[in-house]
Image (cartoon, rainbow, N blue to C red):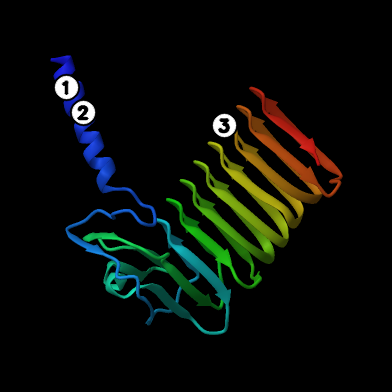
Amino acid sequence: MKILLSSLFFLLLTSLSAQVEVNNGSWFSGRNRVEGNGELETQSRNLDGFTGVHTCCSFKVELTQSRDFGVKVEAESNLQEFIETRVIGNTLHIRFTDDANFKSKRDIRVYVSLPRLEAVDASSSARVTGKTPFTGEDLALDVSSSATIELDFTGQRVDLDASSSGRITVGGSASRVTADASSASTIDAAALKAEDAVADVSSAASVNVHVTNSLRADASSAGVVRYGGNPRDVVADTSSAGRVRSN
C-alpha cells in the first residue's frame, strides 16, 4: 500500500510540475493551449490612477517616471489576450489570465509610465527595472521566488523586503531605510545613501547598506549584513553564524 501511495503521489507531483512551469519557452497552464507565433506586437492598455506595480511569472517590466500614465505590453500577437493588466485599488497588476496555456518564443515585456511610484511587488522570476530615476516620499520594494528589482529612488523612506532567492538592487538617497532579507535572498543598497538604517537578515541572506548616522542590524542563521558610510552609531546583534561587518 505504501508503494502504491508513493507511486500515485509521484505521478501527481510530476503532472502538476509539468503544468505549472513558468519559464520562457515553457507551457503556461490553463485550458486553451496556444504556441506563440514569434511575431511581436506592442499593445497599449488604457490604465491610470496607480502608484504601485505587482507582477510575477517571468514578466520583464520597465518603469519610467513621467507626468502621464502609460502601459504597453510587448508580446507575440496571438498571446496578448492571455496577458492581464488591471488596476485594483492603487496597484497595477500584471499577470496571466486564469485560462492561459501557451508556449512563448519571445520575452514578454511590459512598459509602465507613472507620475509617482510608491510600491513594487515582484515574484516568480519576474524582473522589474527602473529606466529612469524616481523621486517621491516613500517607496516599498518586495521580491520573492527568484524575482529581481533594480532601480534608483530619492525620497524620505525606503522599505526593502526580499525572500526565497529574490534580489533587490537600489540606488539613490533616503532619510531612513529598512531592509529585511531571508532564505538566500539579496538586498544590495550600497548605492542608496541613507542617514539611518535597520537591517534584518536570516537563512543565508545578505544585505549591503550605506548609512551615515545610525545602523541597527540583526543577523542570524548565516545571514550577513555589510555596511559602508562610516555610521556614527552601530548596534549589532548576531546569532547562529550571522555576521555584521563594515565594507
Location of mark 2 (residue): 9
Residue contact between numbered discs 3 and 1, judged by CB atoms under 8 Å: no
Q: Earlier in the sequence, mark 3 or mark 1?
A: 1
Q: Earlier in the sequence, mark 3 or mark 2?
A: 2
The relative height of residue 225 versus residue 56 in the rendered view (above or below) is above
| Residue in the picture at 78% in, 50% down | 211
Pick whichever, 159 or 86, lies toward us.
86
Q: Position of residue 205 (x, y in %)?
A: 60, 37
Q: Position of residue 100 (x, y in %)?
A: 25, 61
Q: Position of residue 222 (x, y in %)?
A: 63, 28
Helix or strand or loop: what does disc 3 sit on? loop
Residue contact between numbered discs 1 and 2, judged by CB atoms under 8 Å: yes
Residue contact between numbered discs 3 and 2, judged by CB atoms under 8 Å: no
Q: Amino acid at mark 3?
A: Ser
Q: Position of residue 91 (x, y in %)?
A: 43, 67
In screen coordinates, is 18 left or right of 115?
Answer: left
Q: Amino acid at mark 2?
A: Phe
Location of mark 3 (residue): 203
The relative height of residue 81 versus residue 194 in the rendered view (above or below) is below
Pick whichever, 60 or 18, lies toward us.
18
Question: Residue 148's quadrant in the figure?
Answer: bottom right
| Residue in the picture at 26% in, 44% down | 18
Mark 3 or 2, which is nearer the eye?
2
Q: CA distance from mark 3 to mark 1?
A: 33 Å
Q: CA distance from mark 1 to mark 2?
A: 6 Å
Disc tally is 3
Q: CA distance from mark 3 to mark 2?
A: 29 Å
* Marking on residue 210: none
Helix or strand or loop: what does disc 1 sit on? helix
* Marking on residue 5: 1
Q: Amino acid at mark 1?
A: Leu
Mark 3 or 1, which is nearer the eye?
1
